[in-house]
Amino acid sequence: MQNRQWRLSRRPEPDEVISPQNFDFVTAPTETPKDGQVLVRTLVLGTSPAQRGYVSTTRSMHEKLPVGAVMRGRGVGVVVESRHAAFKPGDIMTASLGWQDYAVITPTTETLSILNISKVANPVRPLSLHLGLLGGAGATAYFGLLDVGQAKAGDTVVISAAAGGVGALAGQVAKRMGCRVIGICGSAAKCDWITRDLKFDAAINYKTENVDARLTELCPKGLNVFFDNVGGDILNTTLDHLANRARVVICGYISTDYATGPQVGPANYKNLLRNRSRMEGFYIFDYVPRWHEAEDKLRSWFEAGAIDPVEDIDHGLENMPDTLASLFKGTNRGVKLNRVAPDP
Ligand SMILES: NC(=O)c1ccc[n+]([C@@H]2O[C@H](COP(=O)([O-])OP(=O)(O)OC[C@H]3O[C@@H](n4cnc5c(N)ncnc54)[C@H](OP(=O)(O)O)[C@@H]3O)[C@@H](O)[C@H]2O)c1
């Protein structure tokens, strides 16, 4: 079998949006699994802003992908051949399959884990849900909001990148918990979508509106939780609108991903002291032991029709670099995925 692959050919410059020009699209023979390995057909690939860190020249917390290697990326796939006792053909699994049609995976005691290599015991269809609502995006939204942010009924919750994957799910979780939810995002169409379809209480278009003035208007008593996906100016402005004992959740900082000069800290951090508030980062890998809490809850809401999985799906492995680039261009709406092959 032939295996189409995207291999890193050139690292993007610090201010360059990732594009097909950073990769070679090649066709190679599919590897044969050895003892202890499985061959997996990629069905759907996910995206994450963190993937830019895998290939960029700038410092990041992620291991760098060598030039020439298949681009790293999480996916859901079906086992087509197994030489591992715990897997059989037809099993559905999530793993770092990479940007390719077929991947040879080596499950071991060390690598078998929900955020590494994992058999999906009870698959929900479409299987893409295991990368979004029931995968990393859903768990990040759930634990970030409820565990780190301690959001509770009656709280005013503000979310940045509110029409992105994590943001749109976090907003819906906050609504289910009885919070008042305000989303910050980058277009009028996204503002309409999160208020009309996802039932956010209000939206701010940071590209055309004065975020500071709008937060003053919408949060006269201050906000209780800020779920931040973007960092930079939006974080700094929002720190001026904290209620007493507010919780600022540092989930991500996509706005600073292209920053070339020295990074300046948020000058308004002094309000954390004035308002006896807390700002805390978290990493979803730390929640693996509690994963089922988020998955069970999100799955029950999904089955009851109480949460929209907000999937935004491109089709075709050949489009994968553009699929990832949409996160940085702001053209995605919800969890950005690429459908490589139909669900079996
Ligand atoms: N802590 C963790 O363990 C963890 C786990 C997963 C993800 N994350 C983080 O969670 C965040 C959301 O991830 P996601 O996968 O759901 O991506 P996402 O929110 O869908 O990311 C893309 C969105 O970010 C916004 N954006 C892009 N550039 C921006 C800029 N310069 N300023 C402001 N907004 C910008 C765009 O929306 P607009 O149109 O609104 O600009 C875009 O649609 C990311 O920061 C990611 O790194 C953290």
Image: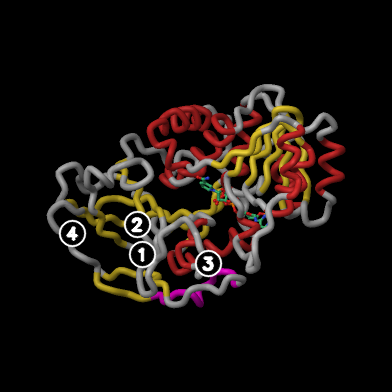
Determine crowd level at label 2: few under 14, some 14-19, many 20+ residues with C-alpha closer than 10 A.
many
Where does label 4 land, which residue?
33
4 or 3: tag closer to the N-terminus? 4
2 or 3: tag closer to the N-terminus? 3
Q: Amino acid at mark 2?
A: Leu
Say which of marks 3 and 1 sits in front.
3
Where does label 2 land, which residue?
97
> Helix, strand, or loop for circle 4?
loop
Where does label 3 land, which residue?
58
Q: Amino acid at mark 4?
A: Pro
> Helix, strand, or loop for circle 3?
loop
Residues tagged 3 and 1 counted as in contact (Cβ below 8 A): no
Determine crowd level at label 1: few under 14, some 14-19, many 20+ residues with C-alpha closer than 10 A.
many
Q: Is residue 72 found left or right of 186 in the rendered image?
A: left
User: Which residue occupies the foreground of this view, 23 or 92?
Assistant: 23
4 or 2: tag closer to the N-terminus? 4
Say which of marks 4 and 3 sits in front.
3
Residues tagged 4 and 1 counted as in contact (Cβ below 8 A): no
